Amino acid sequence: MDEVIEKLKKVEGITSKTAEKILIDIIESKEKLNIIKDVLKTIDENFDNCPICNFYTINKKCSFCDNETRNKDQICVVTSKKEANKILKSDFRGMVHVLNGEINLNKNISPELIQLPKLFARISKDMEIILATNLTFNGEVTANYIINVIKENCKKISRLARGIPFGGSLDYIDEETLINAIENRRIIKK
């Protein structure tokens, strides 16, 4: 059992306790085992990585790259497929590029290891690049690196607005977030 639990823990989000619960649940129910087998077969046969944007494809179709209604002159750069999925579910009508990580010099993760060359190959003079990297040290390093490389090769570079989240209270907001919220405020009446 320990060997199976260790293998299950390699899936992001599955802890030792969760892996043990899953294992016991599947052992106790052949029906659930068959459901898991069916799901894994579906994933194996129908899902893959998009060779252009690094999002996933279903039956060789990417929800971004193979959708003719999307604005090809806007690329939103994100660090993970999970974030790209959030972009897909939003009202954003442009394209996406998934980096599959961030530059991290401490872990020897260089620009070449996170799909940046693929991004740079997609950029043209008519495009807007929207940087949606995380607001962390590595996210900022990644965004700044991208800006320095592409600033002469595209029409516009923008960054997602930063500030107070919906439902947030000023009492619990750190100083940096408050400053960003003030600087990125939206004008209601001019």
Image: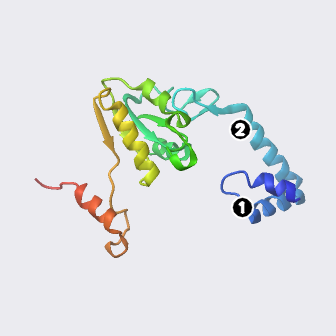
Secondary element at tag 1: loop
**What percent of the width, then of the height, locates residue 156?**
28, 33
Secondary element at tag 2: helix
Q: Nearer the viewer, mark 1 or mark 2?
A: 1
Q: Which of these two is toward me, 164 or 3? A: 3
Q: Split into 4 quadrants, where in the image is the N terminus?
A: bottom right
Q: Residue 15 carries which label?
A: 1
Residue beneath the point at 33% across and 28% down: 127
Residue beneath the point at 33% across and 55% down: 162
Residue 44 seen in the figure: yes
Q: In this view, does 29 lie to the left or right of 92?
A: right
10 Å neighbourhood of mark 1: few (<14), some, or many (≥20)? some
Image height of 109 relative to 52, above or below: below
- The residue wearing badge 2 is 43
**What percent of the width, then of the height, locates residue 24?**
85, 62
Q: Which of these two is toward me, 62 or 139? A: 139
